[in-house]
Image: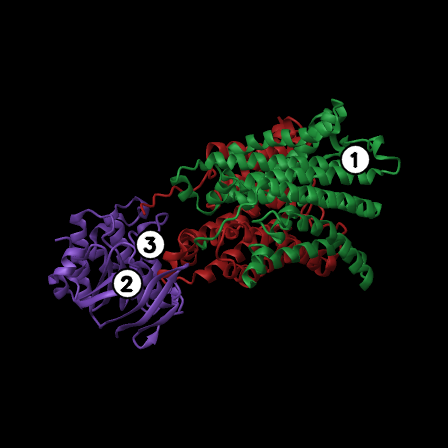
Amino acid sequence: MTQFITAVLTSLSSGAIYALMAIAIVLVWRSTRVINFAQAGQAVLTTYIGYTVIQRTGSFWLALVVAVISGAVIGAVIDRFFMRPIFKRVKSGPIVMIAPVVATLGLLGIIQAIIGFVWGITNQSIEAPVSTGGYKIMGTVIAFSSYNLLVLVFVAVAMLLLTLLFQRTNVGLALRASAYSPEIAKLSGIKVDSVRTLGWALAGAFGGLAGMLYIPGYFLYPNAMDLLLVLGFIAAVIGGLESLFGAFAGGMVLGFAIIFSTTYISPKLFFPTAFIVLIIVLLVKPAGLFAPKKSRGA
Amino acid sequence: MSLTVEGLTIDHGAIRAINNVSFKVGQGQLTAIIGANGAGKTTLLRTLSGLKEAASGSATWNGSSILGVRAEDLARSGIMHVSDGKSVIAELSVKDNLALTGLWRKDKKDVAAATKEVVELFPILGQRMNQSAGSLSGGERQMLAIGRALIARPRLLLLDEPSLGLAPLIVEQIFQTIKSFVKSMDLTVVLVEQNAMGALKIADQGIVLNLGSVVLTDSAENLLNDPAVRSAYLGF
Amino acid sequence: MKKAGKVHKPTTTRKRLLLFVLFGWLLLILGDRVGELELYQGSFVATYALAITSVVLLTGYSGQLSLGQSALMAVGAYAGALSIFNAGWHPVIGLIMSALIAGVFGLILGLVAARLSGPYLAGTTLALAISLPTLANQFPILGAEEGIAFDVGPAPARFGEDFSQYKWFFWISALASLIMVFFIVNLLSSRYGRTFKAVRDNPVAAQLSGINVEQLKVSAFAISSGVAGLSGGLLVMLISGVSPSAFPLSLSFSLLGAAVVTGLYNLKGVILGGLVLVAIPEIADSLVSRIGGSDNLTTVLPGFLVSALLILAVVFTPNGPGHLLKKHH
């Protein structure tokens, strides 16, 4: 029984982190139709920035704020000064599909190299702001701590804010319109390029949040976020890439599948589970669980 | 306020879509551009609204050049393009579709007033406000697309094939509505149509486009009575 | 846009065969003249060139973006290792099994892949790349973390006493790669192969003209997997054993990068691609020792160079260096 409760709770907190990364990927995909592999680099960079803030001030909370803000700034800068020029240059031919992916992979390598050069390649660690010791249930210590709870609360609040932004504000409407139909948005007078940059900034902020919440308990090194990026991407694909709710659901599905298979079958099944869940979902729904139904007549 | 196009040439990949086209549309005039499929009509409109680059030539609205200006800036300066067929965002509600052209406008009171006028013009939209645009019929989508453009209080309206894929009765209704609001709002309109008859009936001026070149420019009335035009484009 | 009326002068298969034999013969002569290190590096160049061929075939010719080539290489590597180490088969049969089993695996995967578009396929192959090698840990027969040996043995005695192990590696990898690439080049220039391009450039038109797009995509996936499998077998031959860590995700990324750098749409660049992958760590090393950089710099420079090259390639020669040359002429 305690094992089951533990599994449920850890699934929730793992899934929440995957969901954050999945949302970062979906935000960029919706705004520019790019799978941003550099997100792993961006998130690790902002976490290093947060790490530096902690070194100087000792405050995790200040570091979290700085990481989220710098994530937004870095995301916007990458879109404005890196992706946009590439899109302008590479307009035709079959490379159009591949170029952005390759460009973000290249950018990932560059960011990681720069981080390694500036901060070194040895493992660093970030101390969690609250206890990481597991709670006690019926006398047994379980693998779910105050920190895991904190992560859950943070992800819930971030999701709520993002949903409000998208559904209740003018900026949100512009973001949605530009994602679904950049051309109609432009013809309606919406500055689609700026809206896209905003999408990248939001994604960067979510990546920054994901990094700062993920690293306590793990180590910080230039490639620390690669795995999270892959899992976030898989979660995003499971959710259908288009929908923010889908990304959240995809993260949770992945979290539960991984934790339950590693708890009850074999701890070695971590990665195979991710693949199997993805394949099953895509075989049933080739465009993911929450792909919007398109009913465009023309 | 007039639209002047001179020597406009547009390439579509390796193909020359529009070749040395010139025409003028006076203030408050409705000009119909007619021609067969592939005559370059849509390419011409897409260039005038900033979606496509021209190879050479000029196009001015109100005395200033509109070539090379971004689509969203042209939209904000009063040039509204309703692109081909049913250009609505299917995933958004009718209300949200209508709101798009009001997002950037400072005068929110006027946005509300314009929205009210549009709903009066197309009452069916009022009943469908909270439905997704994807659930609308073809005619309703066309009304929504035109309504969205009108909320921006445009001065120049570029309409691309509003009759495309609609039942004859609906086509008639759409054309009559266009005619009525163009007069009441004193709009300048370029209407691109394959349905030459319907378009010329409500137009002041007509331009016949064939394989990217202007073949004929005349008053709509003369074109309707021109035997060559009748046999080639009107089918009788 | 296609130039109409371009004179198509087909190189006949026989001419091409002659060319490949000549090239192979040159390589073997060259193999006699260089040192052991060069032979070893040359073997890697040939192996990587073959792996890049599989990427060019799948992504360049059939338009399916796969991030999982390293997983398919792993399948080939394990299949070959089991054939040689467990079944005790001849190394040549082992390498053929590498290609065959990976091809069959790719066929199954291709059936799934053909239903998926762009990012969904990328995501699936990415998941495959991280999960498949770790699956080996599950089965004792695959040797878990330590892996299993992949030993092709020394060169046959009739080649003489001073025929070194590295030269033998070079012979095997160069010849196997040449034969495979020859097969692929012929396939692509056949009527069947040309439909790949038609499907990539305009799937709708291809479908309308009666091409079975899905079937073609599946077969491209299967063939590409077979090529990747052989290169996987060769790779673990060079490092004498196969283990999950031999096929990291970064290998898939490097191969895709090399394919883009040397031209995603032609096979002529694959040797250059192999050279680039082998040369970059060397260049980085010599750069660091020349400017006297720190340990940090030594570690990060190869990654930096590969990434920078990737970005430059996308920005300046998105359709490959060959395309750039053509434009200037």
Q: What is the crowding at mark 1: few (fewer than 14 residues within 10 Å), some, or many (at least 20)?
A: some
Question: Which is more foreground, mark 1 or mark 3?
Answer: 1
Name the residue beneath numbered marker 1: C240
Amino acid type of disc 3? Answer: Asn
Rendering quarter of residue C152: top right
In the rendered image, residues at marks 3 and 2 fall on the same chain: yes
Quadrant assignment, res C150? top right
Front-lying residue, A217 or C174: C174
Tag shown at residue C281: none
Question: Is disc 1 on the same chain as disc 2?
Answer: no
Q: Is residue A277 visible?
A: yes
C-alpha gap between disc 2 and disc 1: 69 Å
What tint does the image give chain B? Answer: purple
Visual hue assigned to chain C: green
Name the mark on residue B97: 3
Q: Is residue A60 above or below residue C238?
A: below
In this view, the residue farthest toward the bottom is: B63
The chosen color scheme is by chain
Q: Position of residue C154 (x, y in %)?
A: 83, 32
Q: Which mark is residue B158?
A: 2
Name the kind of residue labelled 1 in the image.
Answer: Ser
The three-letter code of the residue at mark 2 reads: Leu
- Chain bearing tag 2 is B
